[in-house]
Amino acid sequence: KAGVTQTPRYLIKTRGQQVTLSCSPISGHRSVSWYQQTPGQGLQFLFEYFSETQRNKGNFPGRFSGRQFSNSRSEMNVSTLELGDSALYLCASSLTGPNEKLFFGSGTQLSVL
Amino acid sequence: AQTVTQSQPEMSVQEAETVTLSCTYDTSESDYYLFWYKQPPSRQMILVIRQEAYKQQNATENRFSVNFQKAAKSFSLKISDSQLGDAAMYFCAYAGGGADGLTFGKGTHLIIQP
């Protein structure tokens, strides 16, 4: 069974641009959640989707958004990039939600110049 | 809001020895879950162990076990017979009973000395 796939692995953008990151969960998993990892703030929860509905959102500005498609694949979008958005963005999937075992992807490393 | 605290930024242990990583948390919920995740240099987080708060029995997975003290809000991870492959960042995490995302601690960098 294939694991969680995140694309792209690395991304370089400039301030003011927007970016879209993609996550394909494990087959059969309906919950997809996103996390931002930085050296200063550590791992922070962005949002969680289940069957195309956002069930919860972390404390991030509205520039951060996401969606989930009918095949459970998910995308997150960051508009008007800021230098502070440079981070590793991790996607995780599970059958029903974050309080069970999460399967993580290898992440997308975003650098904003 | 829930908080998770890992007071040891770095720990070092000799191969084959036992090491314990500390974690404390703060919550007002009665139904919750606790986890230890491992992040090797590959960056992919891997679940080490999961504990359901309503279960008094400490979770165990092979060489990994936890000491869950609910009243003290403490959740430490014990690694027995440490192996070189155990070297990684270890994160303690909390999840509430609903669909809230995980709250992570800052992590402990575990070094295994050969």
Image (spheres, coloured by chain):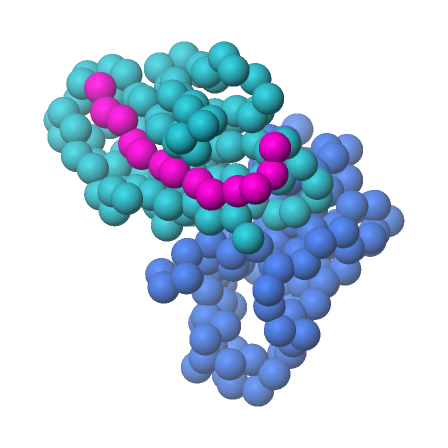
Chain colours: A blue, B cyan
Residue A58 seen from this side: yes
Closer-to-camera residue (A98/A34):
A98
User: From which residue to which does the magenta span run?
Assistant: B18-30
In this rendering, position of residue B34 left or right of residue B74: right
| Residue at image coords 51%, 32% | B34
Residue drawn at (55%, 53%), measured in percent from left and top?
Answer: B1
Q: How many marks?
A: 0
Name which residue lies at 53% across and 42% down: B27
Quarter occupied by residue A27: top right
Q: Is residue A54 above or below residue B14?
A: below
Please tell me whether residue A53 belongs to the stretch shown in magenta: no
x and y percent of residue B36 in the render?
44, 33
Relative to B72, residue A7 above or below? below
Q: Quadrant of residue B79?
A: top left
Quadrant assignment for the C terminus of chain B: top left
The residue drawn where x is 57% and y is 87% is A16
Residue B70 image offset from top left, x and y in percent: 47, 26
State the residue in front, B73 or A42.
B73
Query: Can residue A22 be spotted in the picture?
Result: no
Q: Is residue B19 magenta?
A: yes
Q: Is residue B66 above or below residue A17?
A: above
Q: Position of residue B88 (x, y in %)?
A: 32, 38
**Residue A80 placement: quadrant:** bottom right
In this rendered view, identify the residue nearer to me: B24 or B113. Answer: B24
